[in-house]
Image (cartoon, rainbow, N blue to C red):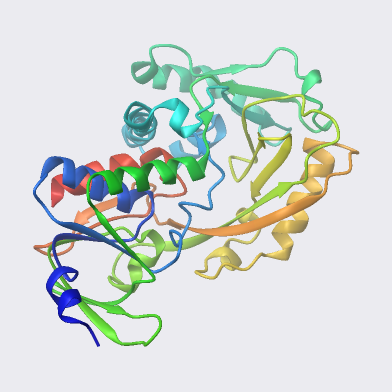
């Protein structure tokens, strides 16, 4: 049951964005900047963005050495190069728009741990540096000369440094997007679960009464990543859950800085404020079990990350974890994001392949151009 005021002022917009994560807010902001007189609303079913936007690890990365080599086994060189460029340019864009201080961006580099399983990748490093040279103007990857001070386990034979990667505060990035939306007069409706889309009509379930509220928009942007398949089953989207854990403050100061990758990027860790270890990933141990839209913690992955912490990251040290959470990402047969029109007035910007921080803003740019 809606009031006269609600029906008159809150239901009709020029653009409605479904999903208030990185892509959704990026799309709304850039549409408003391009069309200042437009009315825009964002519909979000959660209290916070539902998915991975506030649940990621804060890595400002575009691909480790072994990740890029793995991509080259499945994709042509030009596609891999285009993907790296999109990710890197996306990171440069958000740093320019919001500023490093606002994002708490740290330019301390990315690092990959190399064990006997990956040591052959070092033979390909010069080839990859040459491939990436047109984008960066200098070598991206180099081998660290002295790795003993890192204190990693004996299985770590080498460390490859990526001088162009960094890390940021995920929460501050979302706050910056929220602030920009507010400054531009973009309305954000939380607790607004979209149950159906019919042309320009968007049907939303009211959480307290279960009544259906009907919104209307000239243009609609679907930015719900893995959950977009609920509206368009034909899209090549597979959900992928990611686990992240954060320790209590370490007794000894952590001897390294930067964003670290392990096992072709499936595991990642970093030092967060207060000498806490943040570690996550491991879904390659149970791809099938992690193809889910539920947010439970997979005990197999938790045990695996705890073991890696004891044997690789801080061998023989006691590390207690006090936080854990999961986020839902989206993957598919291709690593390219899906940014396309699905009807005359509806566009989608989804399937970011776990790289939402890097390509979320750029995905919004492309989606606005389509709309």
Nearer to us in this view, 332 or 202: 202
Instruction: List x then y, in percent, for residue 155.
Output: 80, 33
How many numbered dots are placed on residues in this image?
A: 0
Residue 62 seen from this side: no
Q: Is residue 17 above or below residue 313?
A: below
Q: Is residue 218 above or below residue 337?
A: below
**Which corner quadrant of the image does residue 212 belong to?**
bottom left
**Which corner quadrant of the image does residue 270 belong to?**
top right
Instruction: List x then y, in percent, for residue 107.
Output: 53, 22
In the visual, does 133 lie left or right of 1? right
The residue sitting at 39% across, 55% down in the picture is 333
In the visual, does 160 lie left or right of 214? right
Nearer to us in this view, 76 or 32: 32
In the visual, does 238 lie left or right of 115? left
In the visual, does 187 lie left or right of 121? left
Instruction: List x then y, in percent, for residue 324.
Output: 67, 56
Which quadrant holds the N terminus?
Answer: bottom left
The residue sitting at 67% across, 43% down in the picture is 278
Q: Is residue 205 above or below residue 316?
A: below
Residue 315 seen from this side: yes
Nearer to us in this view, 57 or 44: 44
**Which corner quadrant of the image does residue 348 belong to?**
bottom left
Instruction: List x then y, in percent, for residue 207.
Output: 39, 80
């Amino acid at each position: 049951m809606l009031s006269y005021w609600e029906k008159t002022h809150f239901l009709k917009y020029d653009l409605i964005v479904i999903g208030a994560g990185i892509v959704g807010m990026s799309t709304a902001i850039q549409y408003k900047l391009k069309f200042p007189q437009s009315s825009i609303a964002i519909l979000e079913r959660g209290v916070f963005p539902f998915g991975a936007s506030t649940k990621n690890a804060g890595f400002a990365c575009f691909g480790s050495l072994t990740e890029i080599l793995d991509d080259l086994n499945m994709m042509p060189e030009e596609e891999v190069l285009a993907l790296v460029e999109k990710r890197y340019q996306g990171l440069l864009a958000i740093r320019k728009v919001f500023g490093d201080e606002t994002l708490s961006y740290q330019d301390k580099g990315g690092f990959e741990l190399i064990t006997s399983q990956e040591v052959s990748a070092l033979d390909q490093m010069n080839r990859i540096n040459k491939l990436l040279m047109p984008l960066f103007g200098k070598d991206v990857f180099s081998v660290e000369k002295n790795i003993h001070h890192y204190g990693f386990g004996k299985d770590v034979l080498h460390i490859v440094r990526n001088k162009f990667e960094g890390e940021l505060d995920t929460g501050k990035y979302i706050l910056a997007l929220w602030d920009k939306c507010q400054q531009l007069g973009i309305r954000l409706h939380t607790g607004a679960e979209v149950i159906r889309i019919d042309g320009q009509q968007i049907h939303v379930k009211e959480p307290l009464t279960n009544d259906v509220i009907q919104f209307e928009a000239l243009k609609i942007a679907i930015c719900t990543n893995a959950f977009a398949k609920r509206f368009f089953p034909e899209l090549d989207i597979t959900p992928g859950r990611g686990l992240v854990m954060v320790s209590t403050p370490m007794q000894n100061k952590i001897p390294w800085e930067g964003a670290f990758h392990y096992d072709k990027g499936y595991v990642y860790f970093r030092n967060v404020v207060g000498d806490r270890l943040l570690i996550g990933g491991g879904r390659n141990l149970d791809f099938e079990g992690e193809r889910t839209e539920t947010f439970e913690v997979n005990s197999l992955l938790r045990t695996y990350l705890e073991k890696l912490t004891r044997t690789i990251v801080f061998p023989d040290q006691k590390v207690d974890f006090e936080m854990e959470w999961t986020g839902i990402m989206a993957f598919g047969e291709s690593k390219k994001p899906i940014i396309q029109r699905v009807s005359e007035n509806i566009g989608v910007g989804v399937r970011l392949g776990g790289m939402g921080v890097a390509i979320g803003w750029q995905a919004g740019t492309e989606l606005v151009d389509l709309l």
